[in-house]
Each structure stands twice: as C-alpha cells, then as structure tokens.
Image (tube, rainbow, N blue to C red):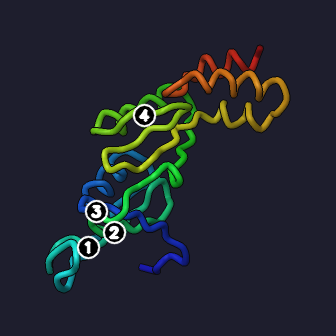
Amino acid sequence: MAIPKNTICLWYEKDAEAAARFYAETFPDSQVKAVHRAPSDYPSGKAGDVLTVEFTVAGIPCLGLNGGPAFRQSEAFSFQIATDDQEETDRYWNAIVGNGGQESACGWCKDRWGLSWQITPRTLTEAMAAGGDEAKRAFEAMMEMGKIDVAKIDAARRG
C-alpha cells in the first residue's frame, strides 16, 4: 500500500479509532485502513495503546493521532460534504448530531470528537457560484438555518 503524498492529520484525545470507524460507516468512499499501536509509553499513553489510525473520509486520506488533551479541534478546520438532496443532507447531519454531536449554523455541525462538518447541498454551492441576486437570496436564506433546507434554498434561488 503506497503512502499518500499528502495526508490530513487529525488530533484526537484518545478516540481516533472510534472516530475513524464512525466516519467509515457514515460516508461513502471511507474506510479504516490500519490501526497502529504505540511501541512504548508516551506522554498521553502506554505501550500497546492505539497511537495512530490510517483512514479515508470521502476519499481523502487521513491519519488520526491519539495525542492526548493538549490540543482541541476548532472550526478552523472542517470537512465539507456535498449532498445532492434533502435526504442525503438529513442522513449525514442526523448521523453526526445523533451520535453525540451538536448542531451549529449555516449547515455546520460538530461530531462528538469536536470535529466540524459542513453538510452542504450542491444547490447552495451552485447558487453562490451563480452570483448576483440569486446568490444573495440563497445566502440570506442560509443565514437563518442550522441544517440546510434544500427546498427553502431552491425557493430563494428562484426568487
């Protein structure tokens, strides 16, 4: 198995394997590839503890690092998942929020490990790319939402 040239490293306090398995069960083209255990004791763990987990999220290579409590996730990094319709939007949103996560605004939510996700219907992205009044109406509609309501975005696009 070739090592990817670029991998996103995500810091977890201690649950990198549980997070990776959740992502693999939730998103297509996602899988846990390998679990590596610490060869000796380290500041936040013992020899034999899970140290790193290689996984993919929607085709993006990631490495989960169980680094202890020194650093926390923030909204400065998020995965943006493009969805095709309300059913897909609901499925991902509900999986993340329903598994100990929390809702936020404008299509953002956090999983139980503090990682931010943007569950973004393609119709919203298309409206923003269209620019002008269409983008303004879609943007203003989005600003009042938690989970994105596809029908309301589509209505706003039409004016």
Q: Local crowd at mark 3 within 10 Å, few (<14), some, or many (≥20)?
A: few
Q: Position of residue 9 (x, y in %)?
A: 44, 68
Q: Which residue is mark 2?
A: 65
Disc 2, disc 1: CB below 8 Å? yes
Q: Which residue reaches farthest bottom?
A: 40
- Choose top left, top right, bottom left or bottom right for residue 135: top right
The CA span between labels 3 and 1 is 14 Å
Name the residue tied to disc 1.
51
Seen in the image, is 79 located left or right of residue 19?
right
Q: Are the two marked residues, 3 and 2, in contact with CB atoms closer than 8 angstroms? A: no
Residues at marks 2 and 4, CA–CA distance in whole angstroms: 24 Å
Mark 3 or 1: the one toward you: 3
Q: Amino acid at mark 2?
A: Leu
Disc 3 target residue:
69
The x and y percentages for residue 128 are 74, 35
Q: Residue type at mark 4: give it.
A: Trp
Marked residue nearer the N-terminal end (2 or 1): 1
Identify residue for label 4: 93
Of marks 3 and 4, which one's residue comes earlier in the chain?
Answer: 3
Name which of mark 2 and mark 4 comes first in the sequence. Answer: 2
Which comes sooner in the sequence, label 1 or label 4? 1
Q: CA distance from mark 3 to mark 2?
A: 11 Å
The spot of residue 15 in percent (x, y) is: 25, 58
Q: Amino acid at mark 1?
A: Leu
Identify which residue is drawn at 41% across, 55% down.
Answer: 73
Task: Between residue 119 and residue 25, name the one nearer to us.
Answer: 119
